[in-house]
Amino acid sequence: MLKGAAVIGQSGGPTAAINATLAGVIKGCFNNRDTITKVYGMKNGIEGFLKEDLINLTNYFESDTEEKLNILAATPAAALGSCRKKLPAPDADKEFFDNLIELFRKYDIRYFFYIGGNDSMDTVAKLTKYLESSDYEMRVMGVPKTIDNDLQATDHTPGYGSAAKYIAATMSEIIRDCAVYKIPAVTIVEIMGRDAGWLTAASALPRIVSGEAPDLVYLPEVDFDTNGFIEKVKSCLADHPNVVIAVSEGIRGADGKYVGEGTQSGVADVFGHKYLSGTGKFLEQLVKAEIGCKVRSVELNISQRCAAHLRSETDINESIGVGCAAAESAANGTTGCMMAMNRAEDKYEITYEAKAIANIANMVKTVPAEFITKDGSNVTDECLEYILPMIQGEAKNYYKKGLPVHLIF
């Protein structure tokens, strides 16, 4: 038994479900009060913790606990704030980690939970590595979060189901809107996804529900050929006047360059990721120049990750579940792991399992080749059947005078 306080942080891009995971971790910690004596939240991730910018979550949730946790789970974005801070390698900056350990000692923190995606798991991995040579006993757990669905070792990630539901619903509405005129027109919808096309794949979900879907779907997993793209568009226009296309922001040519690179700033974050935007606009200009028909581009942008009004009930329940499981596992002795989600083979049923962070951090799970059509211009029904269970149900929202109620620390 390891007795002491816990600290929870959120990192990376927010989602409509990351606060549900936070609620789950808090709940799991409260269920283990014999070992976890107090729960802190770090404001703006590890960056805020280094500044000792903490909130006492035990005190905050002392009254009206269930109601507050429910509203927290329904609140979009990261309630604790986020950051994109890259930690140094443990063997490169011992002083940094020594100072970090001293802060843990100061607040008697023995449990560290970090909710995030690939870059956040890098933080968990580095802290885990350093603690192996430290005399400070502490348990470190990564809790998955990312709309990109690109974390290794887990069937899928919390946040993806809600984003996929929003994208599929929005795409269905866009298709309806585009169908009202007989004038030949092309609508290009740009969807998030740097290295993995899971989000863009979800745009085709209406195909197995209502029979309608984007005519073309392009993912980063396939080399993008502009000439082939134009020929596909021409073929679609010859079949019907209103063509709708879904593209990942991260599609690249065979040379490895982003398709929209000429319209982008080239600025990168601390993890080396270039800020992507403009792929749809580039393709809009290409279609206008090569075909000359009416054309427009739509960038879903941050709406796809913060649209809490259309959250998936399945996603929210799993987000709470994985957070609670992470706290329970840590209290029982687990450390240096990420809490992953396993899917049963014969039916859609999720179980939780702690898996070594060393096999997860800095790796990307892409859409498998069998989920993409041979010509690379769409996804298969098998892919959609894999995604469909994750968007089921509508999570409860809380309203006041017609608008959603959010929990704000």
Image: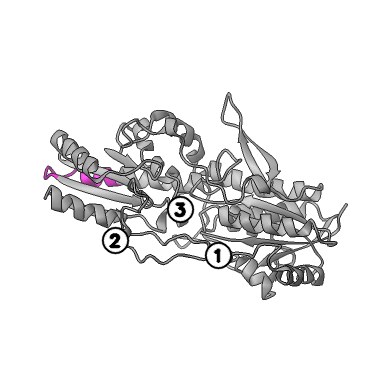
Q: Is residue 70 visible?
A: no
Label 3 sits on residue: 309
Q: Residue at x 81, y 48 (%)?
A: 333
Q: Would residue 70 appear left or right of 239 to someone viewing this image? A: right
Label 1 sits on residue: 84
- Marks 3 and 1 sit apart, C-alpha to C-alpha, by 26 Å
Q: Earlier in the sequence, mark 2 or mark 3?
A: 2
Q: Residue at x 54, y 44 (%)?
A: 315
Q: Earlier in the sequence, mark 1 or mark 2?
A: 1
Label 2 sits on residue: 262
The residue mark sitting in front, 2 or 3, is 2
Question: In the rendered view, how is the structure colored?
Answer: one colour
How many numbered markers are drawn? 3
Q: Nearer the viewer, residue 27 or 123?
A: 123
Q: Nearer the viewer, residue 179 or 45?
A: 45
Is residue 182 a member of the stretch shown in magenta? yes
The type of residue carrying mark 1 is Arg
Q: Residue at x 44, y 43 (%)?
A: 198
- Marks 2 and 3 sit apart, C-alpha to C-alpha, by 35 Å
Q: Residue at x 31, y 37 (%)?
A: 377
The type of residue carrying mark 2 is Gly
Mark 1: secondary structure: loop
Q: In this picture, which residue range is highlighted in magenta?
A: 174-184
> In the rendered image of this protein, does residue 259 appear above or below residue 244?
below
The residue mark sitting in front, 3 or 1, is 1
Q: Quadrant of residue 120?
A: bottom right
The residue mark sitting in front, 1 or 2, is 2
Marks 1/2 in contact by CB < 8 Å: the verdict is: no
